[in-house]
Image (spheres, rainbow, N blue to C red):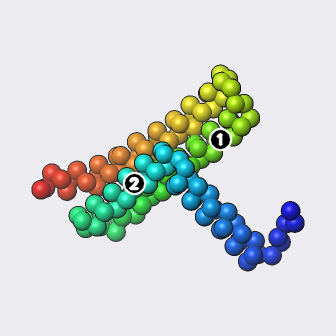
Amino acid sequence: MKQDHTFVTGRLKSLKFALVGAYKLLTTEHSIMVQFFLGILVTIAGFYFEISKTEWMFQTFAIGLVISVEGLNTAAEKIADFIHPEFHEKIGLIKDIAAGAVFFAAITALIIGAIIYLPIIQAL
């Protein structure tokens, strides 16, 4: 394939690839579907409880962080499975480490959610 060296068309092609990848993640990966659904729920909660602009920034960051890391985890798993389809201890370690990164992102998002929503829930 001939590489496109023009700035605008090259960026548009990159954007197309990114959108296709995001669509594939959202339509084929259950973990991404769950995280996306949870992101929609907390977004609705944000509108309902009228959270501040700062809270919106942290909430949006947390949603993006978890979905992004989950996507990278999925990519690492797909690469590992492609390279070594049968069980291998080192491939298992790589997958565990990638899953651990998702865990840290999810814990961070839970803490952010608790900081935003626990005071609101307690005030009800």
Relative to residue 25, is residue 39 drawn left or right?
A: left
Q: Amino acid at mark 2?
A: Phe
44 horizontally vs 105: left or right: left
Q: Give the residue displayed 35% in from the left and 46% down from the top.
A: 110
Q: SS of the residue at dot 2? A: helix
Image coordinates for residue 72, horizontal then vertical, percent: 59, 47
- Residue 62 in view, yes or no: no
**The quadrant where residue 57 appears:** bottom left
Q: Give the camera-side residue of 85 and 7.
A: 85
Q: Quadrant of residue 50?
A: bottom left
Residue at image mark 2: 37
> With 23 as the anchor, is 121 left or right in this view?
left
Image quadrant holding the N terminus, namely: bottom right
Residue under pointer 1: 78
Amino acid type indicated by mark 1: Lys
User: What is the x, y in percent for residue 91?
Assistant: 66, 29
At a point 74% along the width and 35% down the height, the residue shown is 83
Residue appearing at x 61%, y 27% in the figure: 93
Residue at the far right in the pictured view: 2
Q: Is 52 rendered above or below residue 91?
A: below
Residue at x-position 69% and y-position 73%: 12
Image quadrant where residue 46 sits: bottom left
Q: Are marks 2 and 1 in contact (CB under 8 Å)?
A: no
In the picture, which quadrant includes the C terminus? bottom left
How many C-alpha atoms fall within 10 Å of the one at disc 1: few (<14), some, or many (≥20)? some
